[in-house]
Amino acid sequence: MSNLIYAVTGLVSVIGIGVAIWSFIDTRKTYYTEYKNRKAND
Amino acid sequence: MKFSKSKWLAYTFLVGLLPVLTRLLAWANTTTGMVSPIAASDFVAFGLVLHVSVINELEHLPGKEKEWKTIQNGTSLVFVALYSSLYALTIIGEKNASLIDANVMLRSSMILAMVSTLLSLSVFHRVSKLGSK
């Protein structure tokens, strides 16, 4: 039972950390591109 | 709509931490052994507060964020389901200590709570960027 709980926690934690890192990168990419485009138009 | 990270810290993070802080206060004010300083159920409550606020915040985002929103919503739902299962196991463990290892539950819920904090931060980071435009 303990091993199962650890395994599920580990799996979900890896997914969660992956999604969080991807989200930070995606936010940076999206908003940096928009900022650059706005600067170019000014 | 402007949403700053200090609002997230005050309304979500600190409110979610209330059960943990209350337990620590009770532990500090009682005689040794009466109240345990940390418990899995408090971290489960903390995680649930974070993910419910994330799901609520995602509802108000514009349509162009569709893909990102779907991934964050799905992840939050997985976490809510896991926290619910952990809470159910904690309740079972209260009456039958031999069935569930309390230390495993505690470690598991603490790790998940840390990951939930990171996820919640990533969501509110984007929401604050969106609000500052």
Image (tube, coloured by chain):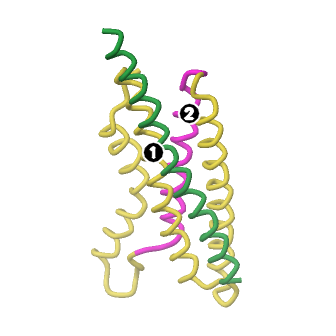
Chain colours: A green, B yellow
Measured Cα–Cα span from mark 2 to mark 1: 12 Å
Task: Give the x, y percent position of residue B70.
Answer: 65, 37
- Find disc 2 in the rendering and name its residue: B58
Task: Give the x, y percent position of residue B123.
Answer: 48, 41
Magenta-drawn segment: B38-63
For disc 1, the chain is B
Residue beneath the point at 40% across and 64% down: B20
Amino acid type, callout 1 = Ser
Mark 2 nearby-residue class (10 Å; few <14, some 14–19, many ≥20): many
Task: Give the x, y percent position of residue B32.
Answer: 33, 87
Mark 1 nearby-residue class (10 Å; few <14, some 14–19, many ≥20): many
Residue beneath the point at 50% across and 69% down: B111
Say above or below: B84 vs B128: below
For disc 2, the chain is B
Q: Earlier in the sequence, mark 2 or mark 1?
A: 2
Amino acid type, callout 2 = Leu
